[in-house]
Structures are given as structure tokens and as C-alpha cells.
Amino acid sequence: MAASVGVALLAGLAVVQVLLAAGAPLGRFAWGGQHVVLPAGLRVGSAVSVAVYAAVAVVLLDRAEVVDVLPDGLVHVLAWVLTGYFTLGTAMNAVSRSRPERLVMTPVALALAVVCLLLALG
């Protein structure tokens, strides 16, 4: 169940990042909220984020034993690394100067941190 929630959240984030990369005026929800429409460099970052989210989804699914593509020891370590990453992301989003980013992305990052923690412990 945790992996399903995590993958759904990552899919939602991927959609947002694709829209940001395409120039949608959603920049206040990402990358510190400094831009309504992201500049070229951040658009590239958003596109790369989609690939990162896909890799994270594979780790979550592998840890939940839905797929088996990575060595078990590596997946266990990666689950803990991702727990730390999303915990840090929660803190970073919580202190963002962008109110929309704080209100939307902080709970998403927190939910992903909890999902990763549950999978790391499991």
C-alpha cells in the first residue's frame, strides 16, 4: 500500500514537472517559487526531475516486492537514503519563501518521507 501511495504522489509530481518544463505558469509551486514561468535552466531541471521520480518509483516498487530489478541490499539502503532525501525536502519546502510551495509541496514531501520510512522499515 505504501509503495502505491508513493508512486501515485511521484506520478503527480512528474505531471507538474512536465508542465513546468513545457512552460506552464506553475513556477510558484517549485524551485523556490521565484518564477511564474521557469527560465530555461530550471525547465531542464524539471525535465530531469521526471527521470529521477521514475527511478525513485522503481526503488519503492522494488522495496515493496512488486518488481525485482535491483539487488535487495541496495534497495534497502536506497529506501533509507530516500527517507532522508524527502525528509530534507520537507524541511526545505517548509521554509520556502513561496507560500504556494510551502502549502502544497511540504505535505507532499512529508508523505513521501513517511512512505519511504515505512518501506525502509518493512
Image (tube, grey):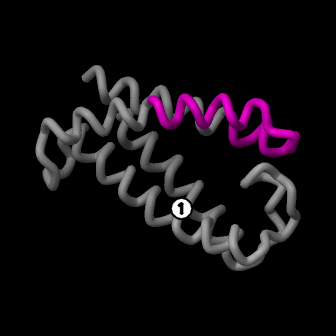
- In the rendering, at what x and y percent does residue 50 appear? 51, 64
Regarding mark 1 in the picture, which secondary structure is present there? helix
Q: Is residue 57 left or right of residue 105?
A: left
Using the image as rendered, state which of residue 24 and residue 43 is in the foreground: 43
Q: Which residues are magenta?
A: 84-106
- In the rendering, at what x and y percent does residue 7 appear? 43, 49
- In the rendering, at what x and y percent does residue 28 appear? 84, 55
Using the image as rendered, state which of residue 107 and residue 86 is in the foreground: 86
- In the rendering, at what x and y percent does residue 67 appear? 18, 51
Q: Is residue 91 left or right of residue 116?
A: right
Q: Is residue 3 left or right of residue 85?
A: left
- Amino acid at pointer 1: Ser
In the figure, 41 relative to 52: above or below? below
Residue 115, magenta (yes or no): no
Residue 95, magenta (yes or no): yes
> Residue at the spot x=73%, y=54% of the render?
31
In the figure, 35 relative to 70: above or below? below
Task: Report the residue marked by disc 1.
Answer: 49
